[in-house]
Every structure is written in C-alpha cells, then in structure tokens.
C-alpha cells in the first residue's frame, strides 16, 4: 500500500473516530438533557400536586372562616340593642323607642318593669316585636296589666329576646305630661 493510501485511511479512521466521539458526546448530552427534563417535569408535577393540596386547604379554611363568620353573626351573644327612650303613656302602658346595634334582627318576646329599688313591678310577654338590623328606630307600645305607673317615680324596663339575651334601659322611664289641647266649641 502506498503512503498516500495509508495516510488517507488513517485520516478516514481519524474522522470516523472523531465522528463517533461527537455522536457519543451528543448522545450523552441528549440523554442528560432528557434526564434533566424528566426531573424538571417530575418536580413540576410534585409542585402542581402540592399547589392543589394547598389550594384545597385554603378553600377549607375559607369555608371554615365563612362558617365561623355566620355563627358569629347568628350567635345570640351578638345581639346588641339600644333602648333610646321609654315613656309612660298611662298607668299601664309604656311607649318605647329602640334600635339594633348589630347586623342582625332582634326579636323581643318579653318585658320586665322594675321600680327604683329594682323590685319587679310587672312582667309581660309581648307579641313578637322585631327590631330590624337596619339601625332605624322601632317604636312600640307595651302594656303592663299589673302596673300602676305614677308621675315622678323612676322605672326601668328590661327586654328579653327570642335568643335569651336581656337588655335593660340605661335611662329611667319618664312620664309624659299631656299637652293641653285648645278648646274648640
């Protein structure tokens, strides 16, 4: 064989070896790249599952908070009533102005009348009286059959709600002096 053929064969073998090395390196990097992509996909899938689990837990917490919020709003301890004024109409009737101080309706079912010594004068069930949550004044009349309300005496009135809460007036019931009407013959 001639030197030229021998050199050509060696060059060819060298090129083939270089080509094999390049293919091997390319295959190695492709394999590693695929493994890294598979690892990234696996990590992404785990993060996705963790995210879904966290989202589910957050939804449960939100639902629990909403439930707690509703319980707080509907809980009888949340009733707040303001007895704005109470006025004696006659010996047994009292006019009362009230308003709800919270975001729930309050249903008054009972009223207790006391004298200045905190003795119960009379207690009466009243027709279901609803004080709306809108905060507006609610005026209504209460009849105490056993009362003999006198001018100049101080009285307190306590309301009992449907949920069992009680509210006592911070002001004493005042007596209304009738306004004289002009005489028209």
Image (tube, rainbow, N blue to C red):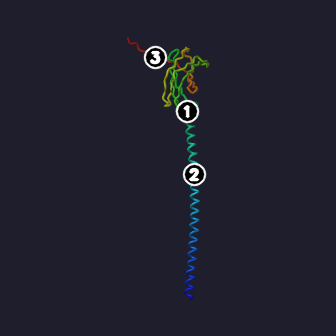
Q: Position of residue 140 (x, y in %)?
A: 49, 22
Label 2, label 1: how far apart the Cα atoms are: 37 Å
Q: In this rendering, which labeled residue sits more in front, label 2 or label 1?
A: 2
Q: In this rendering, which labeled residue sits more in front, label 3 or label 2?
A: 2
Task: Farthest residue to the left: give it.
Answer: 185
- Quadrant for the N terminus in the image: bottom right
Q: Which residue is mark 3?
A: 179
| Residue that appears at 58% across and 66% down | 31
Which dot marks residue 99? none
- Quadrant for the C terminus in the image: top left
Q: Based on the displayed image, in which of its 4 quarters is residue 64 positioned?
A: top right
Task: Farthest residue to the top: give it.
Answer: 185
Relative to 94, is 74 above or below? below
Q: Position of residue 133 (x, y in %)?
A: 50, 31
Q: Which residue is mark 2?
A: 49
Q: Based on the displayed image, in which of its 4 quarters is residue 4 positioned?
A: bottom right
In this view, the residue in front, 175 or 167, is: 167
Q: Position of residue 166 (x, y in %)?
A: 58, 25
Which dot marks residue 74? 1
Query: Which element carries disc 3, helix, strand or loop?
Result: loop
In this view, the residue in front, 102 or 172, is: 102
Q: Earlier in the sequence, mark 2 or mark 1?
A: 2
Task: Farthest residue to the bottom: give it.
Answer: 2
Query: Which element carries disc 2, helix, strand or loop?
Result: helix
Q: Residues within 10 Å of mark 3 (few under 14, many from 20)?
A: few
Query: Which element carries disc 1, helix, strand or loop?
Result: helix
In the rendered structure, the answer to whether residue 184 lies left or right of residue 130 reads left
Label 3, label 2: how far apart the Cα atoms are: 78 Å
| Residue that appears at 56% across and 72% down | 23
Q: Earlier in the sequence, mark 3 or mark 1?
A: 1
């Amino acid at each position: 064989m001639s030197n030229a053929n021998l050199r050509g064969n060696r060059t060819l073998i060298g090129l083939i070896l270089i080509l094999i090395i390049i293919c091997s390196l390319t295959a190695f990097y492709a394999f590693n790249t695929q493994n890294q992509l598979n690892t990234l996909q696996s990590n992404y899938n785990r993060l996705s599952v963790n995210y879904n689990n966290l989202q589910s837990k957050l939804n449960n917490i939100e639902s629990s908070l909403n439930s707690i919020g509703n319980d707080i709003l509907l809980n009888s301890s949340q009733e707040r009533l303001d007895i704005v004024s109470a006025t004696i109409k006659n010996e047994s009737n009292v006019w009362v102005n009230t308003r709800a101080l919270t975001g729930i309706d309050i249903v008054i079912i009972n009223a207790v009348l006391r004298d200045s010594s905190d003795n119960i004068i009379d207690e009466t069930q009243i027709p279901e009286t609803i004080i709306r949550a809108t905060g507006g004044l609610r005026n209504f009349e209460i009849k105490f059959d056993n009362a003999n309300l006198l001018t100049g005496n101080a009285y307190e009135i306590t309301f009992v709600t449907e949920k069992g809460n009680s509210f006592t007036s911070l002001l004493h019931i005042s007596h209304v002096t009738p306004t004289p009407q002009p005489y028209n013959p």
